[in-house]
Image (spheres, helix red, strand yellow):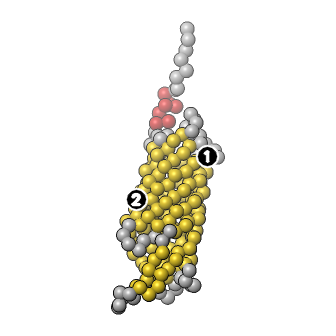
Amino acid sequence: MRRRNTPKKSETNQNNRVKGYVGGSLGLFFPDTDLSLFDINTGLETASIDINTGFGVSVYGGAKFNKYFATDIEIALLGGGTDLSDINYGIFAAFINPRFIIPLTDRNNGVSLFLSPGIGISQASIGDSDVIFLDDYRFTWQAKAGVSIPVSKRLSTFGQLRYASQTEEDTINFFGTEIGLNFEF
């Protein structure tokens, strides 16, 4: 008599349960926007600011529903300098991201690709210690894609590319390259 190799009931239930995860990333960001400053009284343009490459961090936490789909909430901070001396910029953003996962192996914890679009809100601030030229909140969307490589059963490292864009005029859009860690519990 032949026996089938079927998974044990406990293994099947463990693979289908929702798992939590947390993580973070560090990266370089390349803004693609020049902003104009206007005189409040006359409405005339007084200066144009070219935003330089910046550095950023993000932290997130979420739920992985199966090996193909997860969703998370993310907080990102980035900042850098401008072509005007002593003028800096900073961006704070909060996103809700679904994550679509493409496993490259049959194992539950193997190398995988991911795509993660997101929507949220961001605040951009440009100024120096005395004057803030821009300080507003805007609807923001983003798209992330990358590869995740396991380090252990619960820990993985990843590399990702990100593009984010604020809506409306005089916005800050940026492209980023990041590396990070993800811990599943």
Q: CA distance from mark 2 to mark 1?
A: 26 Å
Q: Which residue is mark 1?
A: 149
Image position of 47 with respect to 75: above or below: below
In the orientation shown, which residue stands out farthest toward the top? 1
Circle 2 sits in a helix, a strand or a loop, which is it? strand
Q: Position of residue 98 (x, y in %)?
A: 43, 50
Q: Position of residue 42 (x, y in %)?
A: 35, 90
Image side of residue 22 versus residue 98, left or right: right
Image side of residue 112 versus residue 64, left or right: right
Residue 119 is marked as 2
Image position of 43 with respect to 74: above or below: below
Image side of residue 37 versus residue 148, left or right: left
The quarter holding residue 108 reads: top right
The quarter holding residue 2 reads: top right
Circle 1 sits in a helix, a strand or a loop, which is it? strand
Q: Position of residue 104 (x, y in %)?
A: 57, 39
Quadrant in the picture for the N terminus: top right
Task: Please report whichever mark, 2 or 1, sits nearer to the chain's N-terminal start.
Answer: 2
The foreground one among 37 and 19 is 37
Image position of 25 with respect to 16: above or below: below
Q: Amino acid at mark 2?
A: Ile
